[in-house]
Image: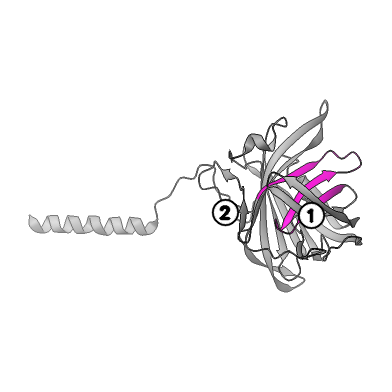
């Protein structure tokens, strides 16, 4: 599970928001938006195909400035985490439950001006519970994961170039492309609710995007691909539905860092004593000693 989490969401986050019933424009994301989702599928195990399932949480945690081709570019920072669950479970089994989200994390920086992806990085937790970076790629000029606006009948080819480390493999000037088609509308019911969606096909998946959720609410594999995703809950602007909570005390998406670029929060943080408190204690102690001396 650990080496495979978050794979479904490679075309991450760049979901459309509808400006009108027949067109979907670029989303109006903001810091604090979150999405919870349920993913099932199969991977190749030592004895053949094995089923897996995990719960994921994705959120926009802040704004940062990246250097792109020598220029400073404002970007939104997304963080995505996951936790494996028994593949025999269903979303209803986890309704109202708390989740740890300790299998790994993925980071994506999206240019605010046009929604292009600038960088992705991620890590998984090894058997010792330590974070191991397995992805860190940049996209020269940015990658337009999905090209807005959307309308039924639109057909485009997504083409991007990436440099860096992707799932443990070096990718230098590595180009990829695949077709994206908007094939229709459909009303879709998932644990987060019932939504009017635009249906996209990208060759390997069929994906359903809803304006109200500011993201896709469902995805299913095509041509024998067994992957399946459903939205469990979300916070988008002023709308909130069914977001999960976490069991880890103080767990916060905003605290997560890429290994080597910051201090990852410890599993069981022990609060330290601020130096200011030590100085105050020293002054108080010195005063007590001085007063006691004067009384003798």
Cα separation between marks 1 and 2? 33 Å
Q: The residue tagged with tag 1: helix, strand or loop?
A: strand
Q: Residue furthest top?
A: 47
Look at the picture and state if 103 lies above or below 277: above
As rendered, which of 289 and 64 lies closer to the eye?
64
The quarter in which the C terminus is drawn is bottom left
Q: Tell whether label 2 touches label 1 (CB within 8 Å).
A: no
Q: How is the image coloured?
A: one colour
Among numbered discs 1 and 2, the one appearing first in the sequence = 1
The residue pinned by badge 1 equals 197
Residue at the image position 74 percent from the left and 52 percent from the top? 195
The answer to which image quadrant residue 121 occupies is bottom right
In which quadrant is the N terminus drawn?
top right
Q: Is residue 206 magenta?
A: yes
| Residue 229 magenta-highlighted | yes
Quadrant of the image occupied by residue 230: top right
- The foreground one among 191 and 44 is 191
Task: Please indicate whether residue 16 sits to the left or right of residue 278 in the image.
Answer: right
* Residue 255 - label: 2
- Residue 50 coordinates in the image, percent (x, y): 80, 30
Which region is colored magenta?
A: 205-233
Query: Magenta segment, principal secondary structure?
Result: strand
Which sits in the foreground, 285 or 93?
93
Q: At which x and y percent is residue 167?
A: 78, 47
The location of residue 79, given as percent across then percent down, is: 66, 54
Image coords of residue 183 (percent x, y)? 89, 55
Say few, some or many: other residues with alpha carbon within 10 Å of mark 2 (under 14 / 14 to 19 / 20 or more): few
Describe residue 225's horizontal placement relative to residue 35 as left or right: right
Asked if residue 212 lies left or right of residue 61, the reply is: right
Q: Secondary structure at mark 2?
A: helix
């Amino acid at each position: 599970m650990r080496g495979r989490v978050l794979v479904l969401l490679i075309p991450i986050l760049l979901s459309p928001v509808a400006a009108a019933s027949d067109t979907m424009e670029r989303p109006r994301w903001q810091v604090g938006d979150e999405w919870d989702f349920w993913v099932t599928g199969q991977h190749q195990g030592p004895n053949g195909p094995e089923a897996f399932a995990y719960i994921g949480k994705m959120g926009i945690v802040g704004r940062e400035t990246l250097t792109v081709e020598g220029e400073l570019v404002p970007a939104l920072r997304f963080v995505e985490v996951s936790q494996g669950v028994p593949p025999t479970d269903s979303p209803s089994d986890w309704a109202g439950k708390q989740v740890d989200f300790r299998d790994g994390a993925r980071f994506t920086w999206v240019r605010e001006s046009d929604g292009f992806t600038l960088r992705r990085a991620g890590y998984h937790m090894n058997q010792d519970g330590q974070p191991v970076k397995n992805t860190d790629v940049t996209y020269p000029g940015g990658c337009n994961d999905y090209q807005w606006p959307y309308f039924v009948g639109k057909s485009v080819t997504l083409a991007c170039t990436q440099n860096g480390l992707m799932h443990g493999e070096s990718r230098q000037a590595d180009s990829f492309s695949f077709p994206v088609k908007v094939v229709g509308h459909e009303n879709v019911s998932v644990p987060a609710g019932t939504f009017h969606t635009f249906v996209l096909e990208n060759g390997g998946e069929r994906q359903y995007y809803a304006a109200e959720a500011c993201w896709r609410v469902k995805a299913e594999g095509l041509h024998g691909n067994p992957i399946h995703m459903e939205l469990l809950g979300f916070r988008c602007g002023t709308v909130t539905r069914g977001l999960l909570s976490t069991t880890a005390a103080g767990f916060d998406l905003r605290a997560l860092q890429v290994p080597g670029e910051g201090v990852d929060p410890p599993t069981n943080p022990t609060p330290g004593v601020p130096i200011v408190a030590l100085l105050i204690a020293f002054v108080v102690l010195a005063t007590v000693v001085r007063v006691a001396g004067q009384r003798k």
